[in-house]
Image (tube, rainbow, N blue to C red):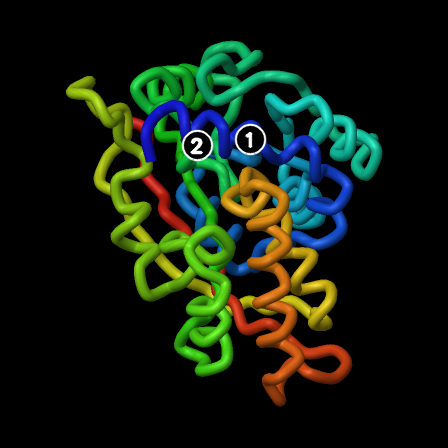
Amino acid sequence: MDQDERLLHAASFGVAAVAYAAHRPDYARAAIGWALEPAPGPRVLDLGAGTGKLTATLVALGAEVIAVEPDLAMLTELRRSLPAVRALPGSAEAIPLPDASVDAVLAGNAMHWFDMAVAGPEIARVLAPGGILAGLWNLMDDGVEWVAGLARVGGSAAIGPRDTPTSWRAETADAHLPKTGAAARFGSPEQAEFPHGQRRTADSLVATLATRAGVLVMPEREQEAALSRIRAYLASTPETARGEFTLPMLTGVLRARRL
C-alpha cells in the first residue's frame, strides 16, 4: 500500500463511526494487562482511540486514560460513550500532550496507520523514561476451519494479513519502526497472543466486516458484492447459519520500551 492509499484507508472510518462503535470488538483484558505490565506507572494514552473500544477496557482496568483521535466523527462517538474520559483531537504525528506525561502509549488496531518517522519521536516525547509503546490487533482465528473459509471468501479487503494469526506477527513485527532510515526510538519488540471472542450473528458479523477500511473504500457495487458473498457463506455454514455464535479470536500485542 502506497502513502496515498494508506491515507485514504486511514481516513475512511469516520463515515462508519456509529457502526464501528456498535460492531467492532473490544480487546482481551489479558492482552492489555501484558501490554502494560512493564510500564513505570498508570498513565496511559490511547492513541488513535477511534470510538473508544480500547479506552473503555483501560478505564475498567483502572488505568488513568487519555484518548487522542484524529477523526472528529469517531471522537464524537467516543465522547458520547465515555464522557468521563479526557478525549482530545490529535494524531500520532502531533500528540497534544506535554513531554513525559504518560507511562504507556497503546494503539488498538491503529499503529499500522502511523507514520513512524514522525510519530516515533512524538510518542517517545510524551512517554516517561522507561515508558512502553504497545500495539494491539484483534485477529480472527483462522486455525478454526470455518473462519479460514470466511477469510478466503471475504478476501483481503475484509480480512487482511494483519487480521489472522497466520501472518499478523510478520506483518506487525516492525510497526514500531520508521519506514525511512531514521533512528529507532524503541527497543526490541516482544509479541504475544491472547484468546478472545465476540458474540455475533451472521448479520452482525457482516456488519462488523463492513467497517473494515478495505471494504469502506470499495466502490459501492463491489462492496455490495463482497458483503453478499460473505452473507451467503455464513448462511451455508453450520456454525454460523442460525442464531448467535462466538467468533473465535485472538488479541495480538506488540510491545516495545522507549529507548
Q: Quadrant of residue 117?
A: top left
Q: Which mark is residue 113?
A: 2
Q: Residue at x 74, y 46 (%)?
A: 19
Of residues 250 and 13, the one nearer the viewer is: 13
Identify the amino acid type marked 1: Gly
Instruction: Tell me if label 1 and label 2 are in contact, CB under 8 Å.
Output: yes
Q: Residue at x 43, y 23 (%)?
A: 127
Q: Is residue 68 visible?
A: yes
Q: Is residue 75 left or right of residue 45?
A: right
- The image quadrant where one finds the C terminus is top left
Q: Residue furthest bottom?
A: 238
Relative to residue 157, is residue 125 depicted above or below?
A: above
Dot 1 or dot 2: first in sequence order is 1
Q: Residue furthest front?
A: 221
Q: Is residue 102 left or right of residue 125?
A: right
Q: Which mark is residue 48?
A: 1
Badge 1 element: loop
Q: Is residue 111 left or right of residue 198?
A: left
How many residues crowd around disc 2 within 10 Å: few (fewer than 14), some, or many (20 or more)? some
- The image quadrant where one finds the N terminus is top left
In x, y percent, where is residue 160? 42, 54
Identify the amino acid type marked 2: Trp
Q: Is residue 43 visible?
A: no
Of residues 149 and 174, the one nearer the viewer is: 149
In x, y percent, where is residue 185? 27, 24
In x, y percent, where is residue 196? 55, 67
Q: Residue furthest left?
A: 181
